[in-house]
Image: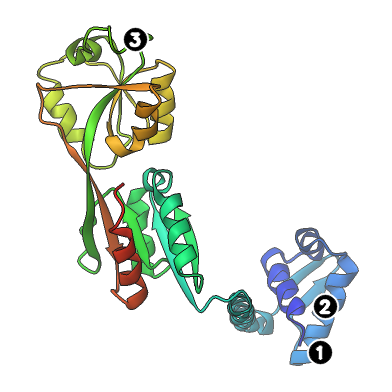
Amino acid sequence: MDFKWLHTFITAAKHENFRKTAEELFISQPTVTVQIKLLEEEIGSPLFERDGRKVIITEAGRRFLPIARNMLSMYEEGMADLNRFRQGFSQKLALAMSPLIAESIMPYVLKRFMLMHPEIEISVQVLDSVQISEKVLSGEVDIGLSRSQTKNSDLICRPLYEDPVILVVPHDGRDSETAPPLDAEELLSNHYLITHNHPEYWDSLLQSLHPKFPSLKTMAVSQVHVTRRFIIEGLGISFLPSSTVRRELLEGRLLEAPCPFINMPIAKTYAILKYEHAKETQFLQFLSQFRF
């Protein structure tokens, strides 16, 4: 049996239309007809009923469809495993991480880890923190790296790092050595505060700010990298984990404004796991050498 026939059958069952099947698979419509006929001869049952230009899946076709999907899935998984073996991989580690983590130190960490462990194939999904726990729970990934703590009792949630949160403002164009100190209260009174770019600390932070700044103007932006860009362009200011603006502060594109009048929050990074097998433990031990 040719596995191309199975792929064609599964696609044809989805559309119940050989023309659309041919378009999706980038093959000719006669090729679709021939492959379905060969598969029908192989299993000894008609898979579709022809009614003019229409095709309707038969009862035998419906019963065979989940079998075909399983056969094709097993074949594709086997070929992927064989390909990993050819490339020298003996293990696979699937990670899910928030954009905030993926764009900070993780490229450096992963590069070092992959050089030290060429036998481990790494895959990465970049997801919002609220989605990461679901991926770990379903077994789609081995480790989740999240800025948000999970409360699911079926998962292990371990804090990895604490990151000070600072008030980040655009550069004012003045020489830092001769310019007067930044006035955070004035900045908060006269600029939009870009909020909710982190999943944990914004609600409590805004509660502490509103009594002192009742007319505070806010603008919610869901991603840190967009927030950074908005601040650089002068659209507002924001409270961000210091690690996410380290480069911009060093290069002078952004400035930090001290806020002695409020208790500044701490942003945390969590490792979320379902199991603590050797590969998960190995990666987290390696990760613990670095600071986000």
Q: Which residue is mark 1?
A: 41
Q: Amino acid at mark 2?
A: Gln
Q: Nearer the viewer, residue 201 or 267?
A: 267
Q: Amino acid at mark 1?
A: Glu
Q: How far apart, in angstroms, are the residues tagged by discs 1 and 2?
A: 10 Å
Residue at 36% from the left image edge and 56% from the top image edge: 132
- The colour scheme is rainbow
In which quadrant of the rendered image does the N terminus lie? bottom right
Placement of 61 over or under 26, stated as above or below: below
Q: Which residue is mark 2?
A: 35
Q: Nearer the viewer, residue 231 or 88?
A: 88
> Considering only order in the chain, which callout, 3 or 1, is on the residue closer to the N terminus?
1
Looking at the rendered structure, the secondary structure element under dot 1 is: helix
Q: How far apart, in angstroms, are the residues tagged by discs 1 and 3?
A: 81 Å
Looking at the rendered structure, the secondary structure element under dot 2 is: helix
Q: Position of residue 33 (x, y in %)?
A: 85, 73
Between circles 1 and 3, the one closer to the viewer is: 3
Q: Position of residue 271 (x, y in %)?
A: 28, 59
Q: Is residue 78 left or right of residue 182?
A: right
Classify 10 Å Cα crowding around label 3: few (below 14), some (14-19), many (20 and above): few
Residue at 25% from the left image edge and 67% from the top image edge: 155
Question: Residue 175 shows which numbered tag?
Answer: 3
